[in-house]
Image (cartoon, rainbow, N blue to C red):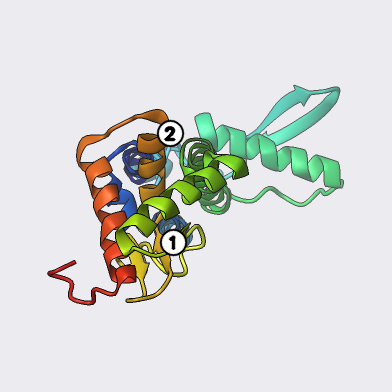
Amino acid sequence: MWVRVALAAFVLAWLFGPYELRAWVPMWLVFLIAVGLELYFFAGALGRAPSRRPDRLPQDIDRERYGYVESPELLLVREGGRELWIPYAGETGEELEALLADARERAEAGEDAPPQPVEQRRRARLPLRRLLVGLGLIAALAVVVWVVETRTGWDGLDSEAKAAATARFSDEASRIAEKPVTVECDETGDHVGVVQHADGAALVGGDVAYVTPERCLELYRLAFEDEVKASQTGRAIAVLAHEAWHLRGEADEGTT
């Protein structure tokens, strides 16, 4: 339970928190760890000995004194025009639901075999139910991340807006490089991003610079929406200028 709460909290922090968190922690890795934990808990629950439920039957001392004959107590449940017989020993809640579910399955299959013990059904069904709930939560959070990212980030801009933005970035970089150059927003992550640990990249003396979509978005907001977000906007400008100086031919990082 607490693992799932922590996962949901981290996803919210990743979406709406500082950019550094998104830059250093890829969301696919978080979801992969979450799925692994769910499978680990599921395997552990299957291999763990079932918890002992309270013994509501007569105790040994009473059996010795008064005698006791072991016989299953069957409870008749009428449901949907049919009769279901279940072995009942005071179970409640999930245990009772497991008994009813097993009786329904046997009735639909036309089986007359005796029902499995309650503990055996609990071991098979409860871990599976918890696994499905956990995987469902992970899938829901993944959908939330996808929706937010595609509607609020660089991917949320249409193709015309992206083309106008990269043209403007290229013009500004060309002024610094003192020659025509092109700035591309590396949406595929092949040149810059988390794996390369860089917000921008350019070949010294070349004519193409690559910038992460996050920095492109900050530059777009500045150039087209007159929106400034303090250090993030400043960092985006610095990345663009830095790579433009490399395109100009400057190789020394300190000078750049």
Q: Nearer the viewer, residue 250 or 188?
A: 250
Q: Could you tell me which secondary element the residue under label 1 belongs to?
A: helix
Using the rendered view, name the quadrant where residue 136 is placed: top right
Residue 179 on image: x %, y %: 39, 65
Can the viewer see residue 48? no
Q: Quadrant of the N terminus?
A: top left
Against 181, residue 120 (above or below) is above
- The residue under the point 33% across, 63% down is 177
Which mark identifies residue 36? 1
Spot the residue most to the left.
254
Can the viewer see residue 201? yes
Residue 123 on image: x %, y %: 52, 53
In this rendering, the label closer to the viewer, 2 or 1: 2
Q: Nearer the viewer, residue 2 or 148?
A: 148
Q: Amino acid at mark 1?
A: Gly
Question: Is residue 59 found left or right of 150 in the rendered image?
Answer: left
Residue 209 on image: x %, y %: 40, 65
Spot the residue most to the front.
178
Q: Nearer the viewer, residue 45 or 135?
A: 135
Sequence-first tag of 2 and 1 = 1
What is the spatial separation of the Cα atoms under label 2 and label 1, in whole angstroms?
43 Å
In this figure, which residue is indicated by the disc labeled 2? Answer: 224
- The residue under the point 87% across, 46% down is 110
Q: Quadrant of the C terminus?
A: bottom left
Using the rendered view, name the quadrant where residue 129 is placed: top right
Q: Amino acid at mark 2?
A: Phe
